[in-house]
Image (spheres, helix red, strand yellow):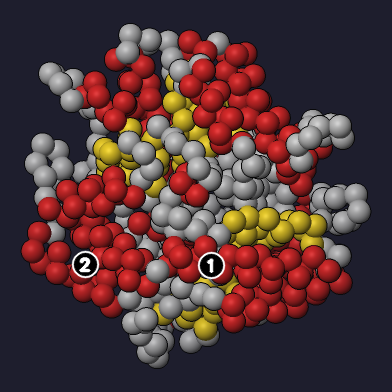
Amino acid sequence: MTIEQTAPVAVDDAALQQKAKDHLWMHFARQSVLEEHGAPIIVKGAGHHIWDSHGRRYFDGLSGLFVVNAGHGRRRLAETAARQAEELAFFPIWSYAHPAAIELADRLADEAPGDLNRVFFSTGGGEAVETAFKLAKYYWKLQGRPTKHKVISRAVAYHGTPQGALAITGIPAMKEMFEPVTPGGFRVPNTNFYRAGEMGFRADPDSPLSEQEQFGIWAADRIEQAIEFEGPETVAAVFLEPVQNSGGCFPPPPGYFQRVREICDRHDVLLVADEVITGFGRIGAMFASSFFGFQPDMITCAKGMTSGYSPIGATIVSDRIYEPFRHGTTAFYHGYTFGGHPVSAAVALENLGIFDEERLVENVRENSPLFRAALERLTDLPIVGDVRGEGYFFGIELVKDKATKETFDDDESERLLRGFLSKALFDAGLYCRADDRGDPVVQLAPPLTIGPAEFDEIEGILRGVLTEAWSRL
Ligand SMILES: Cc1ncc(COP(=O)(O)O)c(C=O)c1O
């Protein structure tokens, strides 16, 4: 592996902190914390490590933000970006084309399951979701069914911040200040098996199916119920992540996506797999839709496509959806100046070349059971209620009482996650996510390059910090 390990970059931390306090507006963050305490300033990355402005090294347990799948510090990707910028830094794909976007579209169509052969580029995940939402509405209009415009998604799911994507996002606290967002978004239960009972699921002890299988049918049927409540002639699409991130890594129960596919077909509703996180090896396949064996009508993706060395997003579309656009005067009046940017597209191709050469997807598939096993060792701690996920994408749900699954109230959650855990994990050398958009979870999504020794390291750090967290409760 060609990852450079050089000394951290020297920066003037105090001067940067002051400029950040004066001028930087951080995303999804309390500015008061920045203005009072400053922020960790990350200056360098190499492999699965990052360094801060004081020269301290951390394990990047979240790949930045589910992004740096091939790891930090890849000179080869930096050189590709420089080469492309020198050759052709920018040209739009509005009626003209350039080689990098063409080659990347070809590669993505090869990787995507079934007949997902057409690629519409954007600059990130939210735009990819927005594109899929607009395309779903337009597609049905072109079919002579203009009332099919609503979208269904799952509780607590995050699908991005544009107002259309926000209508699909299922986290009320992220939307209320911007209401009314685009109308037409409806929510169904997610696939949190740990909390299935609280969502109203009851397993039938006499069923020949496992509890998980029964839950999969129950959860998929909630989608059919929502379609029927709203009227199938009003529903355009269902948006689902193959493994839901927000809430803490909910994998699909066995059979779930197969049943969702049947339901969508029965009611002429498009199935969109939001693979912004799950794409590009995270789950142990290039796309998680293939891993779980279902065929979506569209895939939205971004993040890991370039491992973060340059931004890009894409909506990959089936032949059926593309068909009306192949002829005559019909055009999709939608796009982004920087969509399919030459530098990003060239970097994405090179990044996927690294995936091939270093067998990163296979590495995840082979080692995921060991990662899971390392994290499951933590279930001996009283605070660890559940460990769940797939591939290199796991969530650890924290509880107050393991026997009853009692969770923390808002105050406790605030003290535990914001007041203690995030900082304590970081201080202990692990950058990961402590999140309470659903019940409190610690989330891990490290670079796809790591293996068993690093799993043990992650487990060791978590064990120490979670033990301390429990003693403070
Ligand atoms: C599933 C999913 N969809 C969409 C988005 C939005 O992507 P972006 O932040 O690139 O706009 C995210 C971001 O985390 C995501 O996880």
| Residue located 15% across and 64% down the image | 84
Residue 23 seen anywhere in this rendered image of the structure: no
Tell me the amino acid under the disc marked 1. Answer: Glu
Residue density around tag 1, few if under 14, some if 14–19, many if 20 or more, within 10 Å: some
Hey, which residue is sitting farthest right in the picture?
Answer: 403
Q: Is residue 253 left or right of residue 96?
A: right
Work out whether 259 lies above or below 355: above
* Viewer-side residue, 18 vs 332: 332
The circle on residue 81 is 2
| Residue located 10% across and 36% down the image | 95
* Tag count: 2
Q: Are marks 2 and 1 in contact (CB under 8 Å)?
A: no
Q: Earlier in the sequence, mark 2 or mark 1?
A: 2
Q: Which residue is mark 1?
A: 366
Mark 2, secondary structure of its residue: helix
Residue 92: name its quadrant: top left
Tell me the amino acid under the disc marked 2. Answer: Ala
Looking at the rendered image, the quarter that the N terminus falls into is bottom left
Residue 292, percent across and down? 53, 45
> Is the residue marked 1 within 8 Å of ligand 1, measured from its CB?
no
